[in-house]
Amino acid sequence: MVEIVRKVEASPRARKMGPVSVNGVAISRADIAREIQNHAAPNPTAAWESAARALVVRELLLRQAAFLGLEAEPQTDADGLRETDEEALIRTLLEHEVKVPTADRDTCLRYYERNARLFRTDDLHEVSHILLPAPQEDESARQAARELAQALLTRLENGAVFEDLARSHSVCPSRELGGSLGQIGPGQTVPEFEAALCGITPGTVHPQPVETRYGVHLVRVAHRIEGRALPFEAVEAEIASRLEEHAWHIAVRQYLSLLAGQAEISGIDLDGASSPLVQ
Protein backbone atom coordinates (compact mmCIF):
# COMPACT_ATOMS: atom_id res chain seq x y z
CA MET A 1 0.00 0.00 0.00
CA VAL A 2 2.81 2.40 0.91
CA GLU A 3 4.48 1.72 -2.43
CA ILE A 4 1.26 2.48 -4.33
CA VAL A 5 0.91 5.78 -2.49
CA ARG A 6 4.49 6.70 -3.35
CA LYS A 7 3.94 5.92 -7.04
CA VAL A 8 0.76 7.98 -7.10
CA GLU A 9 2.35 10.96 -5.39
CA ALA A 10 5.32 10.83 -7.78
CA SER A 11 3.16 11.10 -10.92
CA PRO A 12 2.62 14.54 -12.57
CA ARG A 13 -1.11 13.91 -12.67
CA ALA A 14 -1.25 13.22 -8.94
CA ARG A 15 0.64 16.40 -8.09
CA LYS A 16 -2.19 18.36 -9.68
CA MET A 17 -4.84 16.64 -7.54
CA GLY A 18 -5.91 18.59 -4.49
CA PRO A 19 -7.54 17.32 -1.29
CA VAL A 20 -10.75 15.34 -1.81
CA SER A 21 -13.85 16.47 0.05
CA VAL A 22 -17.64 16.31 -0.03
CA ASN A 23 -19.56 19.30 1.31
CA GLY A 24 -16.52 20.25 3.34
CA VAL A 25 -15.97 16.76 4.74
CA ALA A 26 -12.43 15.66 3.88
CA ILE A 27 -11.67 12.22 2.45
CA SER A 28 -8.25 11.50 3.89
CA ARG A 29 -5.38 10.15 1.82
CA ALA A 30 -5.06 7.32 4.36
CA ASP A 31 -8.69 6.28 3.73
CA ILE A 32 -8.14 6.39 -0.02
CA ALA A 33 -4.99 4.29 0.32
CA ARG A 34 -6.90 1.65 2.30
CA GLU A 35 -9.72 1.62 -0.27
CA ILE A 36 -7.33 1.03 -3.20
CA GLN A 37 -7.17 -2.72 -2.54
CA ASN A 38 -10.81 -2.98 -3.68
CA HIS A 39 -10.15 -1.44 -7.12
CA ALA A 40 -8.43 -3.13 -10.02
CA ALA A 41 -6.91 -0.53 -12.36
CA PRO A 42 -4.24 -0.32 -15.09
CA ASN A 43 -1.95 1.86 -12.97
CA PRO A 44 -1.62 3.25 -9.40
CA THR A 45 -3.01 6.68 -10.28
CA ALA A 46 -6.14 5.18 -11.84
CA ALA A 47 -6.59 2.95 -8.79
CA TRP A 48 -6.25 5.98 -6.52
CA GLU A 49 -8.87 7.92 -8.47
CA SER A 50 -11.25 4.96 -8.51
CA ALA A 51 -10.88 4.55 -4.75
CA ALA A 52 -11.43 8.28 -4.19
CA ARG A 53 -14.60 8.23 -6.29
CA ALA A 54 -15.92 5.25 -4.33
CA LEU A 55 -15.40 7.04 -1.03
CA VAL A 56 -17.02 10.22 -2.35
CA VAL A 57 -20.05 8.22 -3.51
CA ARG A 58 -20.23 6.45 -0.14
CA GLU A 59 -20.17 9.82 1.63
CA LEU A 60 -22.93 11.17 -0.62
CA LEU A 61 -25.14 8.16 0.08
CA LEU A 62 -24.52 8.08 3.82
CA ARG A 63 -25.21 11.81 4.13
CA GLN A 64 -28.47 11.41 2.22
CA ALA A 65 -29.51 8.46 4.38
CA ALA A 66 -28.86 10.56 7.48
CA PHE A 67 -30.83 13.47 5.99
CA LEU A 68 -33.82 11.17 5.43
CA GLY A 69 -33.55 9.75 8.93
CA LEU A 70 -33.04 6.17 7.81
CA GLU A 71 -31.73 3.57 10.20
CA ALA A 72 -29.39 0.66 9.49
CA GLU A 73 -30.70 -2.88 9.93
CA PRO A 74 -27.80 -5.16 8.90
CA GLN A 75 -28.68 -8.41 7.17
CA THR A 76 -26.79 -11.69 6.96
CA ASP A 77 -26.35 -13.43 3.61
CA ALA A 78 -26.56 -17.16 2.83
CA ASP A 79 -22.86 -17.57 3.64
CA GLY A 80 -23.28 -16.07 7.10
CA LEU A 81 -21.62 -12.74 6.23
CA ARG A 82 -23.21 -9.80 8.02
CA GLU A 83 -23.46 -6.32 6.55
CA THR A 84 -21.71 -3.45 8.24
CA ASP A 85 -23.92 -0.61 9.46
CA GLU A 86 -22.76 1.54 6.53
CA GLU A 87 -23.53 -1.19 3.98
CA ALA A 88 -26.97 -1.71 5.50
CA LEU A 89 -27.68 2.02 5.50
CA ILE A 90 -26.70 2.39 1.83
CA ARG A 91 -28.82 -0.64 0.87
CA THR A 92 -31.78 0.79 2.79
CA LEU A 93 -31.37 4.16 1.10
CA LEU A 94 -31.30 2.67 -2.39
CA GLU A 95 -34.31 0.45 -1.64
CA HIS A 96 -36.15 3.54 -0.37
CA GLU A 97 -35.17 5.93 -3.15
CA VAL A 98 -34.55 3.89 -6.31
CA LYS A 99 -37.58 2.25 -7.88
CA VAL A 100 -37.66 0.39 -11.18
CA PRO A 101 -40.65 -1.11 -13.00
CA THR A 102 -41.19 -4.87 -13.22
CA ALA A 103 -40.42 -6.24 -16.67
CA ASP A 104 -43.74 -7.47 -18.12
CA ARG A 105 -44.16 -10.48 -20.38
CA ASP A 106 -44.33 -8.50 -23.64
CA THR A 107 -41.09 -6.67 -22.83
CA CYS A 108 -39.37 -9.95 -22.01
CA LEU A 109 -40.67 -11.56 -25.19
CA ARG A 110 -39.33 -8.72 -27.35
CA TYR A 111 -35.91 -9.08 -25.71
CA TYR A 112 -36.01 -12.84 -26.29
CA GLU A 113 -36.83 -12.44 -29.98
CA ARG A 114 -34.14 -9.80 -30.53
CA ASN A 115 -31.46 -11.80 -28.71
CA ALA A 116 -32.30 -15.37 -29.67
CA ARG A 117 -28.60 -16.33 -29.90
CA LEU A 118 -28.27 -15.80 -26.14
CA PHE A 119 -30.90 -18.40 -25.32
CA ARG A 120 -29.56 -21.62 -26.79
CA THR A 121 -27.97 -24.69 -25.32
CA ASP A 122 -24.23 -24.95 -25.99
CA ASP A 123 -22.78 -26.80 -28.93
CA LEU A 124 -21.00 -30.01 -27.89
CA HIS A 125 -18.02 -31.58 -29.65
CA GLU A 126 -16.78 -35.14 -29.40
CA VAL A 127 -13.03 -34.52 -29.52
CA SER A 128 -9.76 -36.41 -29.70
CA HIS A 129 -6.29 -34.92 -29.67
CA ILE A 130 -2.60 -35.68 -29.73
CA LEU A 131 -0.57 -33.46 -27.42
CA LEU A 132 3.08 -32.83 -28.21
CA PRO A 133 4.61 -31.02 -25.20
CA ALA A 134 6.55 -27.80 -25.70
CA PRO A 135 6.93 -24.99 -23.14
CA GLN A 136 5.95 -21.60 -24.55
CA GLU A 137 9.28 -20.07 -23.51
CA ASP A 138 11.33 -22.82 -25.23
CA GLU A 139 11.29 -21.88 -28.91
CA SER A 140 13.49 -24.78 -29.98
CA ALA A 141 11.14 -27.26 -28.30
CA ARG A 142 8.16 -25.51 -29.89
CA GLN A 143 9.71 -25.75 -33.32
CA ALA A 144 10.48 -29.44 -32.84
CA ALA A 145 6.88 -30.05 -31.76
CA ARG A 146 5.57 -28.16 -34.80
CA GLU A 147 7.72 -30.26 -37.13
CA LEU A 148 6.61 -33.51 -35.51
CA ALA A 149 2.98 -32.37 -35.70
CA GLN A 150 3.32 -31.70 -39.43
CA ALA A 151 4.91 -35.11 -39.94
CA LEU A 152 2.03 -36.77 -38.07
CA LEU A 153 -0.50 -34.85 -40.15
CA THR A 154 1.16 -36.19 -43.29
CA ARG A 155 0.94 -39.72 -41.92
CA LEU A 156 -2.77 -39.21 -41.17
CA GLU A 157 -3.31 -38.00 -44.73
CA ASN A 158 -1.62 -41.20 -45.92
CA GLY A 159 -3.94 -43.45 -43.93
CA ALA A 160 -2.42 -43.67 -40.47
CA VAL A 161 -4.93 -44.29 -37.66
CA PHE A 162 -5.38 -41.31 -35.31
CA GLU A 163 -5.82 -43.52 -32.23
CA ASP A 164 -2.56 -45.35 -32.95
CA LEU A 165 -0.60 -42.10 -33.29
CA ALA A 166 -2.17 -40.77 -30.08
CA ARG A 167 -1.05 -43.85 -28.15
CA SER A 168 2.46 -43.55 -29.58
CA HIS A 169 3.08 -39.80 -29.38
CA SER A 170 0.63 -37.96 -27.10
CA VAL A 171 1.67 -37.07 -23.56
CA CYS A 172 -1.93 -36.46 -22.44
CA PRO A 173 -3.46 -39.21 -20.28
CA SER A 174 -6.14 -39.44 -22.97
CA ARG A 175 -3.59 -41.34 -25.09
CA GLU A 176 -4.79 -44.52 -23.33
CA LEU A 177 -8.17 -43.89 -24.99
CA GLY A 178 -6.70 -43.13 -28.39
CA GLY A 179 -6.66 -39.42 -27.59
CA SER A 180 -10.38 -39.23 -26.81
CA LEU A 181 -11.46 -36.33 -24.57
CA GLY A 182 -15.14 -37.22 -24.80
CA GLN A 183 -17.75 -34.50 -25.26
CA ILE A 184 -16.51 -30.96 -24.71
CA GLY A 185 -18.58 -27.82 -24.18
CA PRO A 186 -17.68 -24.12 -23.99
CA GLY A 187 -15.22 -23.16 -21.26
CA GLN A 188 -13.88 -26.68 -20.71
CA THR A 189 -10.65 -26.15 -22.62
CA VAL A 190 -8.21 -23.28 -23.18
CA PRO A 191 -9.42 -20.58 -25.64
CA GLU A 192 -7.07 -21.52 -28.51
CA PHE A 193 -8.21 -25.14 -28.39
CA GLU A 194 -11.89 -24.21 -28.14
CA ALA A 195 -11.64 -21.78 -31.06
CA ALA A 196 -10.16 -24.51 -33.25
CA LEU A 197 -13.13 -26.83 -32.69
CA CYS A 198 -15.52 -24.54 -34.54
CA GLY A 199 -13.33 -24.70 -37.66
CA ILE A 200 -13.24 -28.50 -37.94
CA THR A 201 -15.66 -30.45 -40.12
CA PRO A 202 -16.96 -33.38 -38.05
CA GLY A 203 -15.10 -36.54 -38.90
CA THR A 204 -11.87 -34.73 -39.80
CA VAL A 205 -8.65 -33.46 -38.23
CA HIS A 206 -7.87 -29.75 -38.01
CA PRO A 207 -5.69 -28.97 -41.05
CA GLN A 208 -3.10 -27.15 -38.92
CA PRO A 209 -1.54 -27.94 -35.55
CA VAL A 210 -3.13 -25.99 -32.71
CA GLU A 211 -0.80 -24.32 -30.22
CA THR A 212 -1.69 -23.72 -26.57
CA ARG A 213 0.31 -23.16 -23.42
CA TYR A 214 0.47 -26.94 -23.02
CA GLY A 215 2.17 -27.54 -26.35
CA VAL A 216 1.16 -28.40 -29.92
CA HIS A 217 -2.01 -30.39 -30.58
CA LEU A 218 -3.47 -32.35 -33.44
CA VAL A 219 -7.23 -32.08 -33.00
CA ARG A 220 -10.00 -34.25 -34.42
CA VAL A 221 -13.75 -33.71 -34.05
CA ALA A 222 -15.72 -36.92 -34.44
CA HIS A 223 -19.19 -35.39 -33.95
CA ARG A 224 -20.76 -32.01 -33.31
CA ILE A 225 -24.08 -31.74 -31.47
CA GLU A 226 -25.63 -28.40 -32.36
CA GLY A 227 -27.18 -26.37 -29.59
CA ARG A 228 -30.92 -25.83 -29.63
CA ALA A 229 -33.09 -22.84 -28.90
CA LEU A 230 -34.49 -22.67 -25.38
CA PRO A 231 -38.25 -22.01 -25.20
CA PHE A 232 -39.28 -18.56 -24.01
CA GLU A 233 -41.08 -20.00 -21.00
CA ALA A 234 -37.82 -21.55 -19.78
CA VAL A 235 -35.95 -18.24 -19.77
CA GLU A 236 -38.67 -15.65 -19.10
CA ALA A 237 -37.75 -15.27 -15.43
CA GLU A 238 -34.04 -14.93 -16.27
CA ILE A 239 -34.80 -12.25 -18.87
CA ALA A 240 -37.02 -10.32 -16.46
CA SER A 241 -34.27 -10.39 -13.83
CA ARG A 242 -31.69 -9.24 -16.36
CA LEU A 243 -33.84 -6.34 -17.60
CA GLU A 244 -34.76 -5.22 -14.10
CA GLU A 245 -31.14 -5.32 -12.95
CA HIS A 246 -30.09 -3.25 -15.96
CA ALA A 247 -32.85 -0.73 -15.27
CA TRP A 248 -31.83 -0.59 -11.61
CA HIS A 249 -28.20 0.22 -12.46
CA ILE A 250 -29.32 3.03 -14.76
CA ALA A 251 -31.65 4.40 -12.07
CA VAL A 252 -28.87 4.27 -9.44
CA ARG A 253 -26.45 6.14 -11.71
CA GLN A 254 -29.10 8.80 -12.27
CA TYR A 255 -29.72 9.04 -8.53
CA LEU A 256 -25.99 9.41 -7.83
CA SER A 257 -25.77 12.11 -10.48
CA LEU A 258 -28.60 13.96 -8.76
CA LEU A 259 -26.89 13.77 -5.37
CA ALA A 260 -23.55 14.81 -6.85
CA GLY A 261 -25.19 17.78 -8.57
CA GLN A 262 -26.53 19.01 -5.24
CA ALA A 263 -23.21 18.59 -3.41
CA GLU A 264 -19.94 20.49 -3.36
CA ILE A 265 -17.26 18.00 -4.37
CA SER A 266 -13.60 18.87 -4.74
CA GLY A 267 -10.48 16.97 -5.66
CA ILE A 268 -12.11 14.33 -7.89
CA ASP A 269 -14.40 14.28 -10.93
CA LEU A 270 -17.40 11.94 -10.73
CA ASP A 271 -18.61 12.55 -14.30
CA GLY A 272 -18.91 9.34 -16.25
CA ALA A 273 -17.86 7.20 -13.30
CA SER A 274 -20.07 4.37 -12.08
CA SER A 275 -20.03 3.49 -8.44
CA PRO A 276 -18.34 0.27 -7.31
CA LEU A 277 -20.79 0.30 -4.43
CA VAL A 278 -23.70 -0.60 -6.67
CA GLN A 279 -22.26 -2.87 -9.35
Image: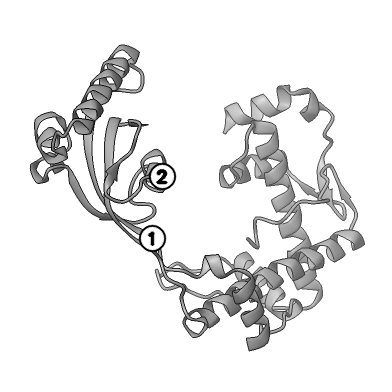
State the residue position of label 1. 123
For the residue pair 211 and 221, the one nearer the viewer reads as 221
Secondary structure beneath label 1:
loop
Vertical relation: 3 (above or below) 277: above
Which residue is located at x 81 percent, y 66 percent? Answer: 254
Residue 209, percent from left and from top: 33, 30
Vertical relation: 240 (above or below) 199: below
For the residue pair 153 and 80, the one nearer the viewer reads as 153
Q: Can residue 201 be seen in this view?
A: yes
Which residue is located at x 20 percent, y 33 percent? Answer: 156
Residue 195, percent from left and from top: 42, 44
Label 1 environment density (alpha carbons within 10 Å; few <14, some 14–19, many ≥20): some
Q: Can residue 212 be seen in this view?
A: no
Residue 134, percent from left and from top: 27, 23
Q: Looking at the image, which residue sits at the far top?
A: 140
Which residue is located at x 72 percent, y 22 percent? Answer: 10
Secondary structure beneath label 2:
loop
User: Which quadrant holds the C terminus?
Assistant: bottom right
Which residue is located at x 79 percent, y 77 percent? Answer: 68
Compute the Cα span from label 1 to label 2: 13 Å
Q: Nearer the viewer, mark 1 or mark 2?
A: 2
Rendering colour mode: one colour
Quadrant hosting residue 125: bottom left
Q: Residue 199 carries which label?
A: 2
User: Which quadrant holds the N terminus?
Assistant: top right
Q: With 259 as the anchor, is 232 left or right in this view?
A: left
Q: Looking at the image, which residue sits at the far bottom?
A: 105
